[in-house]
Structure formats: structure tokens, C-alpha cells
Image (cartoon, rainbow, N blue to C red):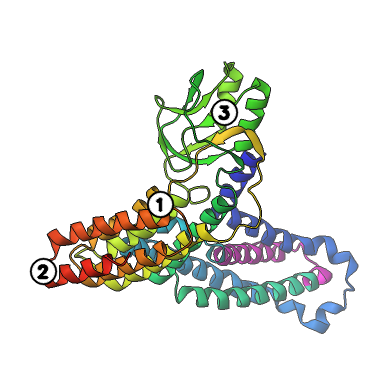
């Protein structure tokens, strides 16, 4: 079921799903007036002016079509702007934005509500009582549209901007990192020693591991009376030759297929179970900002602050031991060296020739080294030495290099 829940969550993030739900709701709202018509006194229509509902629906239908077209153009423009100013990986987070999806879905649903209402009115389906129900529904739809428009205007002020992109990636990275901090092995046991070699299972697809259904692996291991050692963590690139998991028992064909099904493999990486991907995207934003075409050191410096906040989650106090939900599955923990390399190596490469970025990078590493984590200091010192070595080849002035070395010596 966790695998099914993940698939449902991924489906719910699709724009067309939410738009379809709102569209069906709009159609249902327009049709419900026919069913409720017998419950409304006929003389209410003249009292509340329900005869004018046709004109209101005409206005709604034409305006909602224009607003929907404008919103789509604005969203596509924001996707393109964010991709060019930051990284194309940010566009996926913008597409999944619930506020933007709700706005567009509301406009589409309101348009279909108006369209169905106009058709039913012209066909004579509504009587005087039905017009009252349709009029009340129209007032409700207008109220929803006004609230949605106000929220949509507020969102457009920052939607797709560089700062907004950094905040979105940081939020996604923090969510994945905190989930991994709570369960370093995704609820399984920590794999420390060598993996068993009785049987190996490879992927049936070529791509990136997006999600692992550890509960399904636990069921296979329990039925087989053995252990499963995961080789490919979420974010790993897999093919049909290299194993994604090792088993210490001889599995049958059903068990092999169940293990393969537990690994969701796709063409692109996902943020959900992959904290390293969030760090990589943040470092890509910083590297893009330091490119000669953009030349924006301020964005790179802001991104490094976000990287510190994401990595600092790993040093939050733990009040109780991590609970093991899947004792027959073994998964390796994230290596701190890999996390630091994902976060800071692209920044030191792209910003090697910029003194301000180099100093900020050294101060960032100093801040992380001072945190209470047994592996942070060595990882920070390693990245600091790499950054200084790259700066020696990129910065022409010896005094600037000496200043950078002085800051690095404090780590």
C-alpha cells in the first residue's frame, strides 16, 4: 500500500487531475438545480431577481475563458523564466504548486458551470424554481472566483522568481532531509557490512530510482525467510545489468518481480525520498547564477544559506532511537561526504574566480563544521581545501588568495 499511496500522491500533483475534479464539480453544481427545483417555491424567482441569471452566466463564461487563457500563458512564461534563470529542475516544483493548480482549476470549473447553465436555460430545463437554485449557485461560484483571483494575483507577484525558486527547492529538500533524519534507513535496518551474494535482483528499467516501497521488500524477505540488502538508494541511476538489491536466499520468479516492483524507476529524479537531489538543485541554482551569462553572486550567496539550513537538519536533537519497522531489510545511510560534495563542489567550481563567493563559501563551511555532528568537520575541511585549491588557479591576485586561505584556516 505505501507504493500505491505514493503513486496516488504523484497523480494528485498533476495539473489535469485537479482541473478535472473542479470541472466535474462545476458541472454537478449547474445540474443540481434541476434536482432541487421541486423544493423551491415558484414565487421566489421574481423576489430575488433570478431571471437575470442568464446574463450573469454569459458574463462568467466569456470572462472565465479569457482568465483561463491568461493564467495558462502566465504559468508557461513563469516555467520558462524559472528554467532559464535557475535550473529546469525547478519547473517541476512550479507545475506542482497547489495554489496555481487550484486557481486554474477554479477558472476551468467556473467556465464549465456557466456553459452548462446557459445550455440548460436555453433548453428550458430550468423552471422558475430551478432558476432560483441556479442563481444561488452562481452567487457562490462568483464568491469563490473573487477569493481565488485575489490569491492568484498575490501569487503572481512572486511566482517563478529566483527567490521563489530557491524557497521552493529548499522546502522540498528540507522535507526530504527531515524524513531521512527521522528514519535514516527509511524504516529499515542500517546496512554496514558487505551485502550477501546468494541472489541479485536488477532493475527491469533504465532510469533513476524515485521511490522504494520498503514495506513490500519486508514482505518478500519475510516470506523468503531471509534478508534483503538494498543497493540502489532513491536518486541512484540504475540499469538492467547492475543489481538494485541483494538477497541472502534463493527467490522464485514472483519474489524477484516483487522486489523489482518495489523500486519505482523513472526518467527523472524525485524530491520525495531523495534529499541529495534537493541539495543538487540548490547547488545548480548557485552555479547558474555564477555563470558569465548571469553573473549574480548574490543569488549564489543566498543559495548557500539555504544549503546550511537543509544540512543543519541532520544535527537536530533526537529524543528517541529510530524505530525499525522493517527488520529484514537493510539500507545504507546517506554519506555526509556525498551530501557536502553535492552541495558545495559545484559552487566552488563555478565561483572559484570570485573572491566574495569564495569567502562566503568558507564561512558557510565554517558554520557547518561548528555544528554538533561527528562527520561535518572533516567533510567541511575537505570541501574547504578543494575550494582553496580551485581558487589558486582562478584568482590572479595573490593577496586575494592569501585572504581566502586565512579564512579557510579557521575551519
Quadrant placement of the C terminus = bottom left
| Label of residue 228 in the image | 3
Vertical position of residue 147 compared to residue 288: above or below:
below
Under circle 2, the secondary element is: helix
Label 1 crowd (10 A; few <14 / some 14-19 / many >=20):
some
- Residue 200: x, y in percent? 48, 22
- Disc 1 to disc 3, C-alpha distance: 25 Å
Q: Which corner quadrant of the image does residue 138 belong to?
A: bottom right
Left or right: 286 in relation to 314: left
First along the sequence among labels 1 and 3 = 3
Residues 145 and 289: in front is: 289
- Residue 391: x, y in percent? 18, 62
- Residue 359: x, y in percent? 27, 70
Q: Which corner quadrant of the image does residue 367 belong to?
A: bottom left
Q: Do the residues labelled 1 and 3 touch (CB within 8 Å)?
A: no
Q: Identify the magenta region.
A: 102-131
Q: Name the mark nearer the viewer: 3 or 2.
A: 2
First along the sequence among labels 1 and 2 = 1
Query: Can residue 11 be spotted in the picture?
Result: yes
What is the residue that sits farthest to the bottom in this orientation? 47
Left or right: 375 in relation to 314: left
Residues 336 and 25: in front is: 336
First along the sequence among labels 3 and 2 = 3
- Disc 3 to disc 2, C-alpha distance: 55 Å
Who's the residue at 80% across and 62% down the image?
34
Left or right: 125 in relation to 189: right
Label 3 crowd (10 A; few <14 / some 14-19 / many >=20):
many
The residue tagged 1 is: 339
| Label of residue 398 in the image | 2
- Residue 307: x, y in percent? 41, 62
Label 2 crowd (10 A; few <14 / some 14-19 / many >=20):
few
Q: Which corner quadrant of the image does residue 115 belong to?
A: bottom right
Amino acid at each position: 500500500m505505501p507504493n500505491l499511496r505514493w503513486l496516488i500522491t504523484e497523480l494528485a500533483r498533476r495539473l489535469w487531475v485537479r482541473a478535472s475534479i473542479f470541472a466535474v464539480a462545476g458541472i454537478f453544481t449547474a445540474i443540481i438545480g434541476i434536482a432541487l427545483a421541486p423544493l423551491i417555491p415558484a414565487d421566489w424567482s421574481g423576489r430575488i431577481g433570478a431571471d437575470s441569471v442568464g446574463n450573469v452566466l454569459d458574463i462568467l463564461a466569456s470572462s472565465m475563458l479569457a482568465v483561463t487563457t491568461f493564467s495558462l500563458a502566465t504559468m508557461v512564461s513563469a516555467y520558462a523564466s524559472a528554467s532559464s534563470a535557475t535550473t529546469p529542475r525547478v519547473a517541476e516544483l512550479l507545475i506542482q504548486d497547489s495554489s496555481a493548480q487550484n486557481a486554474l482549476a477554479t477558472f476551468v470549473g467556473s467556465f464549465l458551470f456557466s456553459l452548462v447553465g446557459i445550455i440548460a436555460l436555453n433548453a428550458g430545463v430550468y423552471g422558475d424554481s430551478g432558476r432560483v437554485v441556479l442563481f444561488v449557485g452562481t452567487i457562490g461560484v462568483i464568491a469563490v472566483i473573487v477569493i481565488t483571483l485575489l490569491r492568484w494575483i498575490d501569487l503572481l507577484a512572486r511566482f517563478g522568481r529566483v527567490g521563489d525558486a530557491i524557497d521552493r527547492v529548499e522546502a522540498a529538500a528540507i522535507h526530504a532531509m527531515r524524513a531521512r533524519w527521522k528514519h535514516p534507513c527509511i524504516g529499515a535496518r542500517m546496512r554496514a557490512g558487505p551485502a550477501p551474494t546468494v541472489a541479485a535482483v536488477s532493475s527491469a528499467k533504465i532510469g533513476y530510482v524515485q521511490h522504494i516501497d520498503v514495506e513490500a521488500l519486508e514482505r518478500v524477505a519475510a516470506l523468503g525467510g531471509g534478508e534483503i540488502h538494498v543497493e540502489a538508494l532513491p536518486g541512484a541511476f540504475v540499469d538492467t545489468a547492475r543489481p538494485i538489491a541483494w538477497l541472502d536466499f534463493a527467490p522464485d520468479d514472483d519474489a524477484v518481480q516483487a522486489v523489482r516492483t518495489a523500486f519505482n524507476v523513472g526518467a527523472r529524479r524525485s524530491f520525495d525520498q531523495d534529499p541529495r537531489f534537493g541539495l543538487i538543485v540548490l547547488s545548480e541554482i548557485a552555479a547558474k547564477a555564477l555563470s558569465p551569462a548571469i553573473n549574480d553572486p548574490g543569488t549564489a550567496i543566498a543559495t548557500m544559506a539555504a544549503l546550511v539550513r537543509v544540512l543543519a537538519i541532520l544535527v537536530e536533537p533526537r529524543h528517541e532511537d529510530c524505530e525499525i519497522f522493517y527488520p529484514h531489510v537493510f539500507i545504507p545511510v546517506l554519506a555526509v561526504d556525498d551530501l557536502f560534495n553535492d552541495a558545495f563542489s559545484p559552487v566552488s567550481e563555478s565561483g572559484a574566480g570570485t573572491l566574495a563567493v569564495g569567502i562566503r563559501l568558507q564561512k558557510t563551511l565554517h558554520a557547518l563544521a561548528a555544528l554538533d555532528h561527528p562527520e561535518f568537520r572533516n567533510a567541511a575541511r575537505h570541501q574547504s581545501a578543494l575550494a582553496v585549491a580551485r581558487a589558486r588557479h582562478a584568482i590572479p591576485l595573490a593577496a586575494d588568495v592569501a585572504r581566502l586561505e586565512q579564512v579557510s584556516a579557521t575551519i
